[in-house]
Image (cartoon, rainbow, N blue to C red):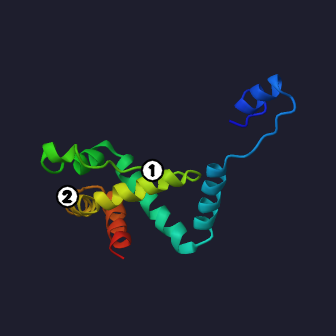
Amino acid sequence: MSGTYSGLQKRINDIVPNAMYVHCCAHNLNLVVCDAAKSSDKAMRFFETVQFVFNFFGGSAPRWALLTLGEDNATAFRKKVLKKVCATLWEARYSAVFALKERFVDVLKTLTVISLTSKKNEEIVHSKSLQKKLKI
Protein backbone atom coordinates (compact mmCIF):
# COMPACT_ATOMS: atom_id res chain seq x y z
CA MET A 1 0.00 0.00 0.00
CA SER A 2 3.00 2.26 0.21
CA GLY A 3 3.75 2.34 -3.52
CA THR A 4 5.17 5.67 -4.60
CA TYR A 5 3.50 5.57 -8.03
CA SER A 6 0.04 4.08 -7.57
CA GLY A 7 -0.25 2.86 -3.98
CA LEU A 8 -2.53 4.23 -1.31
CA GLN A 9 0.28 6.40 0.05
CA LYS A 10 0.61 8.11 -3.34
CA ARG A 11 -3.14 8.69 -3.67
CA ILE A 12 -3.41 10.22 -0.20
CA ASN A 13 -0.29 12.31 -0.83
CA ASP A 14 -1.86 13.67 -4.02
CA ILE A 15 -4.89 14.88 -2.03
CA VAL A 16 -3.12 15.90 1.20
CA PRO A 17 0.57 16.65 0.55
CA ASN A 18 1.32 17.10 4.28
CA ALA A 19 0.04 13.62 5.21
CA MET A 20 2.70 11.53 6.91
CA TYR A 21 3.20 7.89 6.04
CA VAL A 22 3.26 5.50 8.99
CA HIS A 23 4.34 1.91 8.49
CA CYS A 24 1.74 -0.70 9.46
CA CYS A 25 2.66 -2.19 12.86
CA ALA A 26 1.37 -5.62 11.88
CA HIS A 27 3.62 -5.58 8.81
CA ASN A 28 6.61 -4.54 10.93
CA LEU A 29 5.90 -7.36 13.39
CA ASN A 30 5.62 -9.82 10.51
CA LEU A 31 9.01 -8.72 9.17
CA VAL A 32 10.61 -9.05 12.62
CA VAL A 33 9.24 -12.57 13.11
CA CYS A 34 10.37 -13.63 9.62
CA ASP A 35 13.87 -12.23 10.23
CA ALA A 36 14.02 -13.94 13.63
CA ALA A 37 13.18 -17.27 12.00
CA LYS A 38 15.91 -16.69 9.42
CA SER A 39 18.51 -16.16 12.15
CA SER A 40 18.21 -19.76 13.39
CA ASP A 41 19.73 -22.56 11.32
CA LYS A 42 17.31 -25.09 12.80
CA ALA A 43 14.33 -22.91 11.92
CA MET A 44 15.65 -22.40 8.40
CA ARG A 45 16.13 -26.16 7.88
CA PHE A 46 12.67 -26.81 9.33
CA PHE A 47 10.94 -24.44 6.91
CA GLU A 48 13.06 -25.73 4.01
CA THR A 49 11.84 -29.25 4.82
CA VAL A 50 8.22 -28.08 4.96
CA GLN A 51 8.69 -26.38 1.57
CA PHE A 52 10.42 -29.47 0.15
CA VAL A 53 7.44 -31.65 1.14
CA PHE A 54 5.09 -29.23 -0.63
CA ASN A 55 7.34 -29.10 -3.72
CA PHE A 56 7.65 -32.90 -3.84
CA PHE A 57 3.90 -33.47 -3.86
CA GLY A 58 2.94 -30.27 -5.71
CA GLY A 59 5.43 -30.94 -8.50
CA SER A 60 3.61 -34.06 -9.67
CA ALA A 61 -0.09 -34.52 -10.27
CA PRO A 62 0.08 -38.29 -9.67
CA ARG A 63 1.85 -37.80 -6.31
CA TRP A 64 -0.63 -35.08 -5.30
CA ALA A 65 -3.53 -37.33 -6.27
CA LEU A 66 -2.02 -40.24 -4.34
CA LEU A 67 -1.75 -38.04 -1.25
CA THR A 68 -5.24 -36.61 -1.68
CA LEU A 69 -7.12 -39.66 -2.89
CA GLY A 70 -5.03 -42.40 -1.31
CA GLU A 71 -7.71 -43.02 1.29
CA ASP A 72 -11.47 -42.78 1.48
CA ASN A 73 -12.55 -39.95 -0.85
CA ALA A 74 -15.20 -38.64 1.56
CA THR A 75 -12.69 -37.88 4.32
CA ALA A 76 -9.81 -36.89 2.02
CA PHE A 77 -11.51 -33.73 0.78
CA ARG A 78 -12.27 -32.48 4.28
CA LYS A 79 -8.62 -32.60 5.31
CA LYS A 80 -6.17 -29.74 5.02
CA VAL A 81 -4.25 -29.31 1.78
CA LEU A 82 -0.48 -28.88 1.95
CA LYS A 83 0.56 -25.25 1.56
CA LYS A 84 3.75 -23.63 0.37
CA VAL A 85 6.02 -21.63 2.66
CA CYS A 86 6.07 -17.91 1.88
CA ALA A 87 9.33 -16.09 2.56
CA THR A 88 7.69 -12.88 3.75
CA LEU A 89 4.34 -13.81 5.28
CA TRP A 90 4.49 -15.47 8.68
CA GLU A 91 0.80 -16.39 8.43
CA ALA A 92 1.59 -18.44 5.33
CA ARG A 93 4.35 -20.27 7.21
CA TYR A 94 1.92 -21.06 9.99
CA SER A 95 -0.63 -22.36 7.47
CA ALA A 96 2.02 -24.55 5.81
CA VAL A 97 3.18 -26.05 9.11
CA PHE A 98 -0.38 -26.57 10.36
CA ALA A 99 -1.42 -28.31 7.11
CA LEU A 100 1.65 -30.58 7.27
CA LYS A 101 0.90 -31.37 10.92
CA GLU A 102 -2.70 -32.28 10.07
CA ARG A 103 -1.64 -34.47 7.13
CA PHE A 104 1.60 -35.84 8.63
CA VAL A 105 0.49 -39.48 8.81
CA ASP A 106 -0.94 -39.29 5.29
CA VAL A 107 2.32 -37.80 4.00
CA LEU A 108 4.37 -40.58 5.61
CA LYS A 109 2.03 -43.28 4.26
CA THR A 110 2.15 -41.78 0.76
CA LEU A 111 5.95 -41.48 0.84
CA THR A 112 6.16 -45.15 1.84
CA VAL A 113 3.83 -46.16 -1.00
CA ILE A 114 5.85 -44.10 -3.48
CA SER A 115 9.18 -45.55 -2.33
CA LEU A 116 7.79 -49.12 -2.58
CA THR A 117 5.90 -48.84 -5.87
CA SER A 118 7.67 -46.21 -7.98
CA LYS A 119 9.73 -47.22 -10.97
CA LYS A 120 11.52 -43.86 -11.09
CA ASN A 121 14.82 -43.97 -9.19
CA GLU A 122 14.86 -40.20 -8.55
CA GLU A 123 11.35 -40.32 -7.07
CA ILE A 124 12.37 -43.17 -4.73
CA VAL A 125 15.47 -41.28 -3.57
CA HIS A 126 13.45 -38.12 -2.89
CA SER A 127 10.72 -39.97 -1.03
CA LYS A 128 13.24 -41.84 1.15
CA SER A 129 15.18 -38.66 1.96
CA LEU A 130 11.91 -36.94 2.88
CA GLN A 131 10.98 -39.85 5.11
CA LYS A 132 14.30 -39.50 6.94
CA LYS A 133 13.87 -35.74 7.36
CA LEU A 134 10.34 -36.07 8.66
CA LYS A 135 11.10 -38.82 11.15
CA ILE A 136 13.83 -36.86 12.90
Residue at far top of view: 15
What's the residue at 23%, 58% (across, down)? 106
Name the N-terminal-most of marks 1 and 2.
1
Q: Amino acid at mark 2?
A: Thr
What's the residue at 72%, 46% (across, down)? 23
Q: Looking at the image, is 54 positioned above or below residue 8? A: below
Residue 7, x across and y down, in percent: 71, 30
113 with respect to 33 (left or right): left
Disc sitting over residue 117 in the figure = 2
9 with respect to 63 (left or right): right
Q: Which residue is mark 1?
A: 84
Q: Amino acid at mark 1?
A: Lys
41 with respect to 110 (left or right): right
Q: Which sits in the foreground, 58 or 38?
A: 38
Q: Which sits in the foreground, 115 or 54?
A: 54
Q: Residues within 10 Å of mark 1 (few under 14, many from 20)?
A: many
Count of numbered labels shown in the rendering: 2
Residue 74, x across and y down, in percent: 14, 43
**Rendered image quadrant of residue 49:** bottom left
Residue 53, x across and y down, in percent: 39, 58
Residue at far right of view: 18
Q: Residues within 10 Å of mark 2 (few under 14, many from 20)?
A: few
The kind of secondary structure element at disc 1 is loop
Q: CA distance from mark 1 to mark 2?
A: 26 Å
Q: Which sits in the foreground, 115 or 79?
A: 79
Q: Which sits in the foreground, 21 or 2?
A: 21
What's the residue at 76%, 28% (across, down)? 12
Disc sitting over residue 128 in the figure = none
What's the residue at 30%, 55% (across, down)? 120
**Rendered image quadrant of residue 3:** top right
Residues at marks 1 and 2 touching, judged by CB atoms closer than 8 Å: no
